[in-house]
Amino acid sequence: MKKFILGFIVCFGISSWGQEIQSPSKKISVSFSLTSEGKPAYQVSYLNQKIVEESELGIALKNNVALDHGFSLIDRVTTTVNESWQPVLGEQATIQNVYNQITYYLLQKETNRKLNIIFRVYDEGVAFRYDIPKQSNLNYFVVSDEKTHFNLLENHKAFWIPGDYDSQEYAYNETNLSEIDNSKLDMNNGIGVKSIASPYRVQSPLMLKSPSGIYINIFEAAVVNYPVMHLDVDPKKFDLKSDLVPNAIGDKAYLQAPCASPWRTIMISNDARDIVGSKMILNLNEPSKITDTSWIKPMKYVGIWWEMHIGKATWDYAGSQNAQNAADGQLKPSGKHGATTANTKRYIDFAAKHGFDGVLVEGWNAGWEDWFGNWKENVFDFSTPYPDFNLKEVNDYAKAKGIKMIMHHETSGSVANYERHLDRAFELMQQYGYPAVKSGYVGKIIPRGEYHDGQTMVNHYNFVAQRAADYKLMVNSHESSRPTGYSRTYPNYIAAEAARGNEFNAWSVGNPPMHETILPFTRLLGGPMDYTPGIFEIKMNIYDPAKKEQVHTTLAKQLALYVTLYSPLQMAADLPENYEKYIDAFQFIKDVAVDWDQSYYLEAEPGDYVTVARKTKGKDEWFLGAITDENPRKTVLKLNFLTPGKKYKATIYEDGKDAHWEKNPKSYAIKTIQVTSESKIKLNLANGGGTAISFIPIK
């Protein structure tokens, strides 16, 4: 790591409103002041245009103690940081971390309590957090509210999902701030537990675009020992207020000084590419706490998963009709169980044949007959296989083929039960050589009253990653709270779902074509997403003529998602037999890398399109993905990201001339041309379509 720190900042001064600090390029400035009542407040400007007007700050503690007024400024300390660091896995091999920082030391006169507020100003945005130092009159305390405001000036276009404390699995809405209203939404669209108390509550990250074309993203970073922050919207004043997820008795966080809140972040730019390509959230997290990271490896995998979503197979061994017998320990096979030894070997053979790293198996362990809808505490033990799944036989077969097995742990929301079994489950993984686990948290949290996004659950997700690191295991969590950059601190937290994934296309109204163009501006800012792309049989009526469900993309767009939706853990999610039918298109999935030296976002507009080019880690090979929403799109791209002076074979996987996400989604074409860094390339994206390109040097 290269690091340069100074104890002063030349970009610090006194503005007409308050004390001001600027970003290194001076594009962004933050003004801080105390009001006449001693309330801390701030403003943010971008290119001399006010973005956030006077917004108050503070924390409320239980028993009517409020750290939000009566303060005086007793000191301030400024620093500037210019450093770089290397992520274990990532979109780029080196990340720059450059910012100016100021810490305001405040004293509340009536209570003699201290509160520090830290601001960091980057060229791409602003971050601030509350820091509570150790003090004799404030040791253990309970946070009852956080009075953080983001007071916007205009009726921005917003890309939002409702503020559900238990689920992020919603399709995005695109409306003005003034039109946000959860009460008008269809809340039965998919699965989830639906914990929404306010019609004007949305989740962060919240992506915004002002009427004048300024892009703003409000999010948070480094959520550790604290609940997730949602946002309460005043649709008339355009004021957003932090909303912390409570526990069963309404408390938000139990803390002990010294401690700090997560960072509250505001990304700002007149170019959407700056938002989607920002590494500010990662930079705000602590460096890796894992010394030896050699065992943390990217993976491309297949698995027994999609066949359950399309109804071809079941997770449970006995079938739901035998649930009572299962509860009595009298398991009778239904004949549709997916996770059998024989079926797993078939996937292992397919993975070995096509050069994949791993195979995921869901439904291997006993308990699935009695879990969904019952929400019992002791459903799974994470070590007892069904009678038709032989752990040792599967493991030996995979090892002989050079394939790693990926473990699956569905907790059914019973967190205490999972933690009781965690060490035994990880020991079993070590015994059989599993390098990674996919965990699941479907259903209401047990113990009752806790939410997926509350402090207790945030601590649980982080604890699982920490404990897994002790066993040198990687974690991919599903139905967890959305990541906020913690993969920098524990890089074995290799991926998460934490949004509406591809499986919704199999059994619900699905994900609209614009969905994947919004995710890079929201969910993916906090860390890699296991979206499970690569579905080739788009329409579900191929399995059942009565089914109307379908994936809302073209086949070519499913290929492009491997580049546009970053993850070092990528699944080829469709059935092996479907890939065999389209083996020429499948070649891109086989070729595409999952770990990168560099990434360039060439085009981006939330809700409309994303185009990104990435260089393979350690190789002069490039891959490009371009996707669009429900509208067709034509564009011309410069290939100046390629190495000058070299020739490349570009293999282009594109939508067919008659392709359409709904009418003709499987129409695609493949062509090969020769290009250099001076070339330009024309792309024609169909409605809901995409293009995927590999660039391989010609020797």
Image: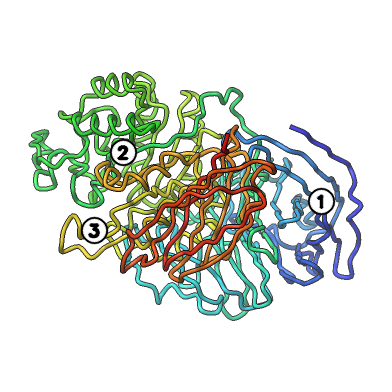
Spatial CA distance of label 2 from label 3 is 19 Å
At mark 1, the secondary structure is strand
Which of disc 1 and disc 3 is earlier in sequence?
Answer: 1
Determine whether 182 is above or below 229 in the image: below
Sequence-first disc among 2 and 3: 2
Residue type of the residue flagged with mark 3 = Met
Amino acid type at circle 1 is Ile
Q: Which residue is mark 1?
A: 102
**Residue underneath mark 3:** 540
Nearest to the eye among marks 3 and 1: give it: 3
Query: Residue 134's x, y, as percent?
Result: 72, 40
| Residue closer to the observer: 233 or 510 | 510
The image quarter containing residue 552 is bottom left
Sequence order check: which comes first, mark 2 or mark 1?
1
Check disc 2 and report its element: helix, strand or loop: strand
Q: Residue at x 71, y 68 (%)?
A: 55
Q: Is residue 662 left or right of residue 484?
A: left
Q: Is residue 612 above or below residue 407?
A: below
Distance between mark 3 and mark 1 Cα atoms: 55 Å
Is residue 404 depicted above or below 612 in this figure? above
Q: Position of residue 345 (x, y in %)?
A: 24, 29
Q: Which residue is mark 2?
A: 303
